Image (cartoon, rainbow, N blue to C red):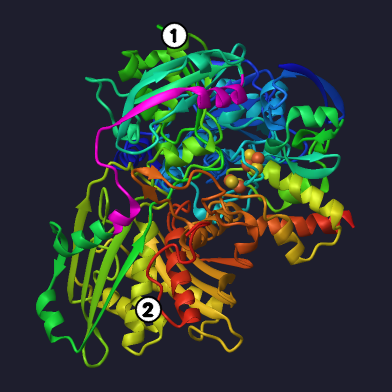
Amino acid sequence: MANFSININGKVHEVDVDPKMPLLWAIRDELGYVGTKFGCGIGQCGACTVHVDGVAMRSCQMTVETIAERERAITTIEGLSENGEHPVQQAWLEHDVPQCGYCQAGQIMSAASLLNNIPNPTDEDISTGMAGNICRCGTYTRIHAAVKTAAAKLS
Amino acid sequence: MQSTRRNFLKVSAATGGGFLLGFSILTSCEQKPAVVMMAPELVMPEQFVELNGFIKIAENGIVTIMSPNPEIGQNVKTSMPMLIAEELDVDWGNVIVEQGKLDTENFTRQIAGGSQSIRHGWVPLRTTGATARAMLLAAAAQQLEVDVADLRTEKGTIYGPGDKKISYGEVAELATTMDVPEEVELKDPKDFKIIGKSTKNVDARKIATGKPLFGIDVQREGMLHAGIIHPPAFGMELASFNADAARAMPGIVDVVELDCAPEGKEMQWSDGGTVRRSIAVVGKSTWQVMQAKKAVQAEWKRTSPAESSDGHRSKLASLLETGKVEVARRDGKPEAAFKEAAKIVEATYSAPFLPHNTMEPMNFFAHVTNEKAELHGPVQTPEFLEKSIATLFDMDPANIDVGMTRMGGGFGRRLYGSFAVEAAMISKAVGAPVKLTYTREDDMTQGTYRPDYLVTYRAGLDADGQLVAFHVRGTGTNGSPVFANRFPAGSVENYLAENIGMDSNITTGAWRAPRSNFIAGAEQAFLDEVAEAAGKDPIAFRLELFDRAINNPVGEKNDYDAERYAEVIKLARDKAGWTGTSNNDGTHRGFAAYYCHNSYVAQVLDLTMDTDKPKVGRVCCAVDCGIVVNPEGAINQIEGGIVDGIGHALYGQITFTDGKPDQENFNTYRLIRHPEAPTSIDVHFVDNGIKPTGLGEPSLPPVIGALANALSSAKGERVYDQPFVGGLRG
Ligand code: FES
Ligand code: FES
């Protein structure tokens, strides 16, 4: 166990954890940001997606130690916008995307990062960019449409 | 339309229990803040009147409606309250929806399963709304000193003669003192204002902003975290274990052995898949517990034979040949008819075991003491869970409190609440509130799978290409997939349906559209093969059969309405612009139609091949589910079923080696991903005003048939064995 400072949603938090604890579990169990989800723990499903210095990453695949040492700034779904007004979140509401909703925080974080990199994505860009996020309920066609709507809002 | 209270109880009794109105009359309850979908956020004021178990009204007109049933993503938390709000006649914009707890006095059938929530709630929930409205009207009549017949309501306001008007909020308290009416009138569907309008998911904003909604998000003061260790293979049991090393690890509080099915305790169906003896690791955080699990040294002993997938397929095949046959239905003289047939078509179809793989792994919160039990989490069968807990702990159900969270998927997996029972056992053992969380590996390897299946179809055609004999014989682990009275039963003179069962120690259970999720695809693929042998277009061939079933049906037990079936097929055909199975542009088309869970679905699926990889393009889907309560939500369900069906048929399979599942996580188990989803899905509803039926399941079964037919056209040879493409390894 050791003390680490990690920057989450613009705030520095102190955690006393095993250095190898994945960021996912530090933010969920230790800090109570439960919007970031556990799905597989092996970097395959995307449910745990957060932004690390603005880029979508799998929080189950990064240790607290690394994040703290490199002084990364983490954004979770709770910090993407104040109150759900990020264009991607708005597009998600407009298209009524969620079914069970469990994968959606990860999908939204991936989509926001995708649009940061490619403001005007083609269908193929969206398909490839979102391929790392599994939706067991099968909302992919809605996600696809919502990413396009968000892109239009952003441009 | 008249609906008396007695009438209404009769309806309920017929559908499996009374939906009691339960008029607990409370005033000035504590505020429970709740928020709805879009901005601005609605908050229930501190003072409000509870009209019955479902409805609370505040003076400012804000209404809270309880949603009684578990929400697994089928959107009942939106659509069921819509039924109440419609008859109550309030503005949906003023409605807050809250998840009801398990409350066997006020609510019944608090189950998510079989696509039945809306079907069973249709009359009772509307009656609840109408009854509350009638009491509000009676109170208004008293207050305004007018005859109740001179009053009308609109969006939460009661209007009387002249400019007299009063809001629901102003008369709610008085309304609680009114007699509960014996008789209420339900609206004529043409007057519906909320039902039939696309209404956004009431939890959408919370989902999009990451609010704690799910079982896995539950956090309590002093709560410990737990993990579970099950036997590594089916047919094995715990012999002994050493947890010294695990206990010494940081954050670990205890390691305990559980017996979740002790001798002498009666189990019920929802305990299916319960692992009797397992090991629980309890600690301060999920991660520490996961680490410590690896340090537990357990010895396992074999208690029943190890089964492997290779052996399974050949065992099912030999059972089909020589197993004990149970005749499910026989019409005419099938054996003789086959003998006389000019042409016989025969084909055998198979599908593997499937895990549910809800995105949210199994988890549950429990706090159990000697006196009482609090359970909170994602379960499709809260009422049964309460019974299991009462039995296990010899506890009065009155001291058991079961709360429901939103669920990160169900698909049938959470009908079996053994994980919640485990959480309760752990809490009792360590004397603390506990949240048990399965890892993905625990979740995928623990069982209650969709069974593996094998079915052989035979069809006899006469010289004119008429279907004169039909035979289906099916088998599967823990039960056959064949439905005796489904189409084409009723359309063929000589018909035989047979079942053969196979026992296994691999636990199986309901998986989205049980049995239909396999048999529909097999049947619809076979009908295409028969149509081809008869030299007919697949849709025209089916419609000919339905003509027979409409005009001169064989047998009396056919469980479908042939006219509705034919209608939905024609709608799909017309909307898709069907001209046949292959188009000049390299697109291959597959058709299928199926009836299950009281709804009718027909689909045309377009597919192209990218070298050897199939890519689904457009899926055109026609649906007859009667009145569509919430079109947007309904379409979302249908899309989900289509993507789910395509994904599992192409890639899904769990296999076994010596009783041990070969796939444990998404690196070896393949789920459909974004690039593999259909390019577009268009949904068309039959508008017939018939009472609504469910949608959580019906779009999945046929799409496997449509996919198989399109794929067969693309490949130039029929496909028989799922998964059509395969998993990640093999
Ligand atoms: S939980 Fe991190 S990718 Fe699945
Ligand atoms: S909405 Fe359920 S997993 Fe995506």
B404 over B8 or under it: above or below: above
Residue B403 location (% of width, % of height): 50, 25
Relative depth, front residue between B406 and B718 = B718
Residue at (82%, 42%) from the top-left corner?
A: A85
Residue stretch in magenta: B285-313
Question: How far is mark 2 from mark 1, CA to CA?
Answer: 60 Å
B253 over B534 or under it: above or below: above
Q: Where does ligand 1 appear, by image quarter?
A: top right
Residue at (43%, 16%) from the top-left corner?
A: B256
Instruction: Say what secondary structure mark 2 lies in.
Output: helix
Relative depth, front residue between B110 and B135 = B110
B314 over A79 or under it: above or below: below
Residue B531 location (% of width, % of height): 34, 83
- Give the residue type that dot 1 points to: Thr
Does label 2 or label 1 sit earlier along the sequence? 1
Instruction: Say what secondary structure mark 1 lies in.
Output: loop
Residue B31 location (% of width, % of height): 65, 18
Q: Report the disc number at residue B528.
A: 2
Left or right: where B310 falls relative to B634 = left
- Chain letter of disc 2 in the image: B
- Give the residue type that dot 2 points to: Asp
State yes or no: Cβ of the residue under disc 1 lies below 8 Å from any atom of ligand 1.
Answer: no
B236 inside magenta stretch: no
Left or right: where B334 falls relative to B113 = left
- Asked if residue B25 shows in the view, the reply is no
Residue at (18%, 77%) from the top-left corner?
A: B493
Rate crowding at label 1 as few (under 14), some (14 to 19) or many (20 or more) other CA atoms within 10 Å: some
